[in-house]
Amino acid sequence: MPLPERMKPARVTRKQMKELVSQLNDILDHIDNGMDENNEELRKVRTSS
């Protein structure tokens, strides 16, 4: 029996992976510079994806 479509692994391109890594690095930079999770700037970065 074949896997349902929702259970098949998602295809991720190199470009998508680079964008996600870039967003992650931005979030980590903000956290490393002392921002907490309630900071508005950090929330904007986190929800912009």
Image: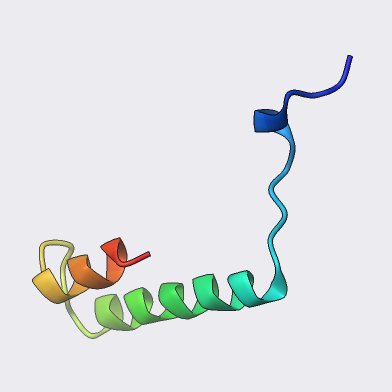
Q: Relative to 12, is 23 on the left or the right?
A: left
Dividing the picture into quadrants, the one containing residue 42 is bottom left
The answer to whether 1 is drawn above or below residue 44 in the figure is above
Asked where in the image residue 16 lies, by quadrant, the reply is bottom right
Q: Residue at x 10, y 70 (%)?
A: 40
From the viewer's perspective, is residue 27 above or below residue 7? below
Left/right placement of residue 11 relative to residue 36 reads right
Q: Is residue 5 above or below residue 26?
A: above
Number of marks: 0
Taking the spot 59% from the left edge, 78% from the top edge, the residue there is 18
Residue most toward the right? 1
Q: Nearer the viewer, residue 19 or 27?
A: 19
Outermost residue to the front: 5
Q: Quadrant of residue 49?
A: bottom left
In the image, residue 47 lies at what x, y percent?
Answer: 28, 61
**Colour scheme shown:** rainbow
Task: Residue lying at the far top in this picture: please name it.
Answer: 1
Q: Please report the residue visible at 62 percent of the width from the left and 71 percent of the height from the top.
A: 17
Q: Quadrant of the N terminus?
A: top right
Above or below, comparing residue 28 to residue 6 in the picture: below
